[in-house]
Image (cartoon, grey):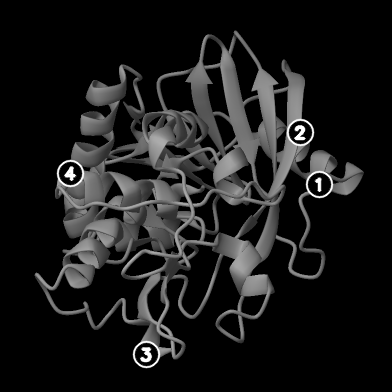
Amino acid sequence: MGLAGCCLAWQLSFAGRAFSWHDEVWDGASSRVAAGMINPVTGKNFNPSWRLAEFLPEAEAFFRKVGEITGRQLWFPFPVWRMAGEQEWPKFLEKIAAPETQPWVAGVEESVSGWRGAVVLRGGARVATRDFCEVTRAHFAAQQAEVAGAARLVLCEGAAGLIGGRLGHHRCAKGEILSLRAPSWRSDRMVIGAGGWLVPTGEGTFKAGSTYVWDRLDGTPTKEGREAVERIARRLGGDDFEVIDHEAGIRPIVRRSQPVIGPLPDGRVIFNGLGSKGSLYAPGVATRLERWLTGEAGLDPELDVGGL
């Protein structure tokens, strides 16, 4: 079970709702390899993530609560350093003055070796996604059972469901990630730039990524992918590192890279499309799905799968 299913299980449990689940492990599942990075201002246009002010506090409260219950730290806050070269710098300075971006800007650093400068963002975090999924499976192990008798069957299939044609057209993309050992690197920030990112994972280790490949949707790491991510790591961290793991996963992406929930024509329900921002959106979207399933609220029109 990936982020979507695990978050829904917890939200149903918090609401006192009975459920059962069926768990399948897929080699290409993004939750298995994801860095769990939450970056508040993203993309080439340097815009705040969709509904960020709403979903970010929900995500933090959720992962801290689950961490307290399970005895595992799952939420690790970090500032985000968004690096910029000479060509990007004027655009970044313009963007950070925009009213929607200002709340997320903690400062500007102009003395950054190898770069024109960096915008320092607040609201960043790493979620230990693999740990989260593992402790969730253990916590709800007794509820792994056949789901045929359930009132509603919710499909949280990630990229496997999209590739299988569950929603028609999809935009899934394969990404390769390296785990690195680099004790000399700074571990007090997440760094974005050079077409990728670098995330501290504790005790001198980091995750670096990631590639985007649309025509080979499998969970197999490649030589080309490793070389591409190593270039990113050198640009963002330096040459002094050791590769300790190399993994690949498939991002489940539909429409505008925003998640979807709601009923399918056959009566089943779907929760999918978390893309590369599952750590940010999965907890809050799971809450909205739980409320709709139990009749406490209508379906959020911006999440409704019927709008595809």
| Residue that carries the numbered disc 2 in the rendered image | 246
In space, the residues marked 4 and 2 are separated at their CA atoms by 36 Å
Q: Amino acid at mark 2?
A: His
- Secondary structure beneath dot 1 equals helix
| Residue that carries the numbered disc 4 in the rendered image | 14
Foreground: disc 4 or disc 2: 4
- Secondary structure beneath dot 2 equals strand
Q: Please name the residue shown 67% across and 64% down the image.
A: 173
Q: Amino acid at mark 4?
A: Phe
The spot of residue 148 in percent (x, y) is 45, 65
Q: Nearer the viewer, residue 179 or 166?
A: 166
| 65 in relation to 186, above or below | below
Residues under numbered marks 1 and 4 in contact, where contact means CB atoms less than 8 Å apart: no
Foreground: disc 4 or disc 3: 4
In space, the residues marked 3 and 1 are separated at their CA atoms by 35 Å
44 left or right, relative to 123: right
Q: Which image quarter: residue 228?
A: top right
In space, the residues marked 4 and 3 are separated at their CA atoms by 29 Å
